[in-house]
Image (tube, rainbow, N blue to C red):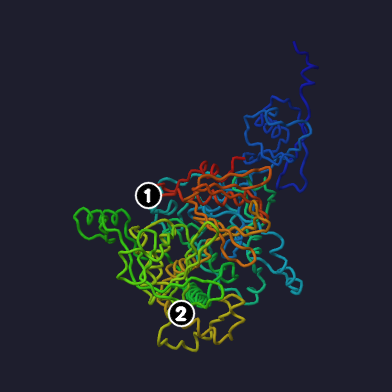
Amino acid sequence: MLSSSDFASASWELVVRVDRADEEEQKEVTLRVSGDLHIGGVMLKLVEQINIPQDWSDFALWWEQKHCWLLKTHWTLDKCGVQADAKLLFTPQHKMLRLRLPNMKTVRLRVSFSAVVFRAVGDICRALNIRRAEELSLLKLSDECFKKKKKKEKNNKEPVIEDILNLEVSPTISGSPVNPGLYSKTMTPMYDPVSGTPASSTMTWFGDSPLTEQNCSILAFSQPPQSPEALADIYQPRSLVDKAKLNAGWLDSSRSLMEQGIREDEQLLLRFKYYSFFDLNPKYDAVRINQLYEQARWAILLEEIDCTEEEMLIFAALQYHISKLSLSTETQDFTNESEVDEVEAALSNLEVTLEGGKADSALEDITDIPKLADNLKLFRPKKLILKAFKQYWFVFKDTSIAYFKNKELEQGEPVEKLNLRGCEVVPDVNVAGRKFGIKLLIPVADGMNEVYLRCDHESQYAQWMAACILASKGKTMADSSYQPEVLKILSFLRMKNRNSAPQLASGLENMDMNPECFVSPRCAKKHKSKQLAARILEAHQNVSQMPLVEAKLRFIQAWQSLPEFGLTYYLVRFKGSKKDDILGVSYNRLIRIDANTGIPITTWRFTNMKQWNVNWEIRQVAIEFDQNVSIAFTCLSADCKIVHEYIGGYIFLSTRSKDQNETLDEDLFHKLTGGQE
């Protein structure tokens, strides 16, 4: 039998600090506990001892030394490993956080510091009315990125007051249910739950969004362009190594904010992390499309992605057009477009198909394998030889290009056959100079094989370019995305094509434009202001009739068509190599790039990947591909978990499908990105 003294010796004192908003200093509370007391019991004792009537439901215990939350309330202190020397903090799980959005606007809202970042970002996006939260994440910028800013600020005597949109009113509590009566299966809002009037297309997409009409328009409409001086003050990455440093700050999606040292009211960046934008729909995605446009705009202005001067002028013209439309009052309402009921549209489409009529998309004869055959010019770069293109007869079939000396020899043996699966396709176009080139970087055992093709005109270029892009992904021209790809390329070329007789812009229109706001500082330095304004207005003639949302979508499409689109850089050291390289991670491939020259060395496709994992002891990522190809590297500019999560994240996003009805398999995400820790 145990005596009372024996029982007393089995119990011990536990000191817990209590973090309350209305008290500046944290109060210490001493509890007498035993190892078999569960976490929920400790919290109950704590609340009883504090004896202050308030809502304690959001409070939980944080273990400082172990840097972890004690959220499993049924676990005992012994099972958790908590002993008398443990420093515990009783603190709210939801705290305020400042988030810098892609449009440079800062919002302040209550976020869960105890949920893993993947779930916390989902709650944030629900609050901000952004669908497809899995494409976004939180980024913490290093102090280096602010150095340039701080130097400039020393000269300014007046402190800059940041305009913050405060959404404190409604905490984004994890998993808060959306009113099921508000939405149909097709996600079309039916009525407003408060007034009973028809709901706006985008405003109340999430039932628990604290955004009012006014706040939503702030996030769904483009901000006025920054002054050239403000633009020059923002940090610009100059080299691939600089760009690699920017990507070191992505937070780990499998751990909470508190576990990663994020403090209350700290500022983080909310950004699109994965460049795989699923189901962009103007009907629901006003905020998402605008934030995506803004992220693309800043990537162009700060030269985070390279583009030619001709492309820079198109981006400038679209920005000018969007900023003009955003300022005009007529476009402030998204709902005035005539909306077709989705179910009706689907039924009429089905009716047409069943009656054997001609549906919107013409179905090709599936027995016919499409092919392209035409005269093109080819050039292979060799040392000490001038760029001389030679004409051949080219035949494009499946995912390969074969070329012959002339059309008559097509049935014989080709001069060479190029397999484009896994290659890099880079546009080499100058519309004004009537140059329509395609640069192919084809992976071979010892690196990349470089081939240049030259087309005669726009339509030929669009067909061959689209075929090359699809072939690089392992798809043929029979794929349904071939025709839309051709049309997308043609529309982009038309935007580049200056009108032969441009209408002279009125003096007033010239006056209200500050051309340096719409191009990168380096581009602005090359030209005089008047000359730049004239060229932007000339390019604007091609886009001047576009509605606002279409112009933003066109900007995003043009950004997506840039050769370097979607590449995230990391400084790595490959196993067996004596020098550092850059690793580019994209939605469908990995690229090894020479850190000094920026030239791609080798490309590996995710479709050929068999497995990938991490050796946590030496922090090395190892990847196995088909045909016994394997690579291993250590990451120098960031933690290897960040790179590993990028690869797993893209593979996770490729599993999404339309029939998922917005639900995501969070367990699968953590399985693919966790690295078997």
Q: Nearer the viewer, mark 2 or mark 1?
A: 2
> Residue at label 2?
540
Q: Is residue 405 above or below residue 636?
A: below
Kind of residue at badge 1: Ser
Kind of residue at badge 2: His
Horizontal side of residue 247 vs 411, given as left or right:
right
The circle drawn on residue 184 is: 1
**What residue is shown at x 44% (from left), y 88% (from top)?**
504
Task: Pick whichever, 133 or 455, lies toward us.
Answer: 455
Estimate how packed mark 1 is, as few (under 14), some (14 to 19) or many (20 or more) residues with alpha carbons within 10 Å: few
Can residue 329 be seen by looking at this rendering?
yes
Task: Pick whichever, 200 or 420, lies toward us.
Answer: 420
Task: Pick whichever, 251 or 418, lies toward us.
Answer: 418
Q: Is residue 511 above or below residue 601?
A: below
Horizontal side of residue 299 vs 463, given as left or right:
right
**Percent position (x, y) of residue 78?**
70, 27
Task: Quadrant for residue 598, please give it.
Answer: bottom right
Estimate how packed mark 2 is, as few (under 14), some (14 to 19) or many (20 or more) residues with alpha carbons within 10 Å: many
**Percent position (x, y) of residue 46?**
71, 34
Helix, strand or loop for disc 1: loop
**Percent position (x, y) of residue 365?**
25, 58
Horizontal side of residue 379 vs 459, given as left or right:
right
Q: CA distance from mark 2 to mark 1?
A: 40 Å
Task: Pick whichever, 102 or 448, lies toward us.
Answer: 448
The circle drawn on residue 314 is: none
Can residue 336 be seen by looking at this rendering?
no
Pick whichever of labels 2 and 1 is earlier in the sequence.
1
**Percent position (x, y) of residue 296?**
53, 66
